[in-house]
Image: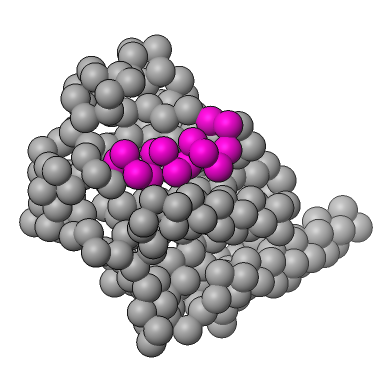
Amino acid sequence: VHFIEIRARRNLEGVPFVPCMTGEDRKKVEKVMAESLLAVEDGQYFALQGSSTWEATPNGMTDEDAAALVADEVLMPKPSSPEALASSLDADWPHGRGIYKGDVGTVAWINHDEHLVLGSWAGGDDVQGALERLLEGLQGVEAQLSNRGFKFAQSERLGFLTTDPGAVGSGVRCSVVVSLPELSKDEPFLASSCVERGILYAPGGEPDTWKFTCVENPSMASVDTAVRIVGLLRELLATEDQLEFDNRN
């Protein structure tokens, strides 16, 4: 297992979602989200270059900070797809947007396509550890938001509300990248294993690596996304080990 990524999407109740936000809305969300994140964990907030809405860095992050975030593959990209542009996700770019980077494998985007996208990363196969860090982070942010008079937008019937309709519910998506040299020769088996569990798969960017992503639905709890991924990993890695053993003998 190369790495694990778990992300949660959240929005504030009573504030327009990103496609409908004004400049003042973005500035308000940036302030309350960044301050809440900084109060939860010792990290750093980087306003996008050219943004004038974060008082601590009125011109946004430095070139050095941007280069470091690019190297870590967490710099927020400007929306460019036809769907994103039609939804005005690029309105007033880059103002009111930024990246929070914590010290224990957490990263957050503010005002990209949701008010908050909080992610937890881990090397190896520690899905439980990544999920626990994410849930602890969400609970901490929620408590800090409450102190400031805000809360996450949520429906009793649907769960957490998001700009992306596919993320409504838990708002959590879990992905893993795995090296599978033997199973890469049998893509139909990979496909059938994923379809059974409602998991998407795609090439992982390197030879014989694959990225598996659990697809959310409104009835799933956050833990269910990790359970599905863990079940798939166990099956695939056991099969991979057996194939390697058979080939050696």
Residue 2 pos. (x, y %): 65, 44
Question: Based on the displayed image, in which of its 4 quarters is residue 174 positioned?
Answer: bottom right
Q: Is residue 169 left or right of residue 240?
A: left
Question: Based on the displayed image, in which of its 4 quarters is residue 222 positioned?
Answer: bottom right
- Whether residue 177 is visible, yes or no, is no
Name the one closer to the observer, 97 or 218: 97
Residue depicted at x 45% and y 52% = 147
Residue depicted at x 39% and y 62% = 151
Residue 123 pos. (x, y %): 67, 42
Residue depicted at x 87% and y 53% = 248
Q: On the rendered image, what quadrant is the C terminus found in?
A: bottom right
Q: In this view, does 181 lie to the left or right of 82?
A: right
Residue range in magenta is: 30-43
Q: In this view, does 95 lie to the left or right of 161?
A: left
Residue 66 pos. (x, y %): 37, 21
Vertical placement of residue 228 versus 209, above or below: below
Name the one closer to the observer, 13 or 189: 13
Magenta region includes residue 62 = no
Q: Is residue 206 left or right of residue 29?
A: right
Residue depicted at x 27% and y 24% = 55
- Whether residue 221 is visible, yes or no, is yes
Residue 144 pos. (x, y %): 48, 50
Name the one closer to the observer, 77 or 209: 77
